[in-house]
Image: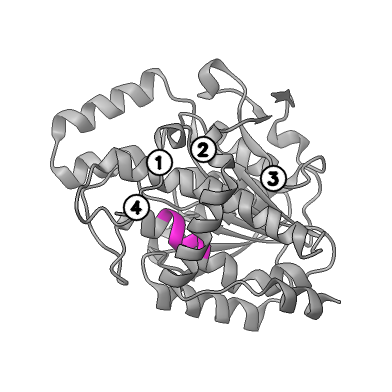
Amino acid sequence: MTDSGWTADRMPDVNEKTVIVTGANSGLGYEVTRALARNGATVVMACRRTNHARTMKGRILTEAPDATLDVRELDLADGSSIHAFANDFESEYDDLHVLCNNAGVMAVPRAETADGFELQFGVNHLGHFALTGRLLDSLVETDGETRVVTQSSGVHEDGEMDFDDLQGEREYDKWDAYAQSKLANLLFAYELDRRLDAAGIDDVASVACHPGYASTNLQGRGPKEEGSTLRLWMMRIANALIAQSAERGALPMLYAATAPEITGGEYVGPDGLMNMRGLPSVQSSSDRSYDEAVAERLWDESEELTGVTYDFGRAKSVND
């Protein structure tokens, strides 16, 4: 573990940088957006609920009137929305310096995306896999170093890839499904970095991070959808007593997105007790997350399910 002692005050200059943040209208995504925008970045707020995103954009502008924020609709549970978002972005922006794969759902009752995928695996992993693939050319063609930062969770340590039942159709447990999706995030982030290196694409780095235990609206969605008032109150009490703020929980993603010492393949999280709170540091994830054979299988499955194929050779030739 590397102790960085890093806070947002140490963020390097991000003026003239363009950043996409998924789920930018609440929780960690909002705090990441707020910090980047206040420090000069152009931030594309990629959100499903655009009306709420515009409200949060206005809140940031009251603090930083000169901030550049662009609200755009993105539903990670719908492949056609992902395709449309990427096409629209690439038609209007010349550069993409950082893609923050932040949005997610946690421990919800079983539901399916528009494309028939189990919701947690579909949004948390497949949606971001497809989005990153569709934006790969933008990342490669941008001058200088660019990054993909994928948000995981400490819960990934309980995850296991069940390739015989990826969509939880035969058996479903909301926490097992969440852990699997967060393990998938890490397998994807590391495999993406390996494939970029193998293709000789040196200016794009793939990094993973986790927020520790941060108080956000994410924890309440599952209890609300189940109609469990008791669980909702228990979650709120735990957030009040144990969790760090969303602003502090956003620091690992901000560090992974901007710190000059990041080179690719790292896992960044809080450095405090049980990695649940504290300042960002480079850490190790579970042994399963480094299994290259599992990562390759997940990659192949993800391309087949989403219909999004990564062409690293074409991306490199376009950049050259």
Identify the residue under disc 2: 288
Q: Main secondary structure of the magenta part?
A: helix
Which label belongs to residue 120?
4
Q: Are marks 4 and 3 in contact (CB under 8 Å)?
A: no
Does the image show residue 62? no
Give x and y (percent) for residue 291.
Answer: 56, 43
Sequence-earlier tag: 4 or 3: 4
* First to last magenta residue range: 124-129
Quadrant, the N terminus:
top right
Q: Is residue 169 above or below residue 256?
A: below
Give x and y (percent) for residue 130.
Answer: 51, 68
Quadrant, the C terminus:
bottom right
Which label belongs to residue 177?
none
Amino acid at dot 3: Gly
Q: Is residue 278 above or below residue 115?
A: above
- Near mark 4 (Cα within 10 A), the count class, few <14, some 14-19 or many ≥20, is many
Query: How far is disc 1 from disc 2 in space, using C-alphas?
Result: 8 Å
Please say whether residue 185 is one of the residues in the magenta stretch: no
Identify the residue under disc 3: 265
Which label belongs to residue 160?
1
Sequence-earlier tag: 3 or 1: 1
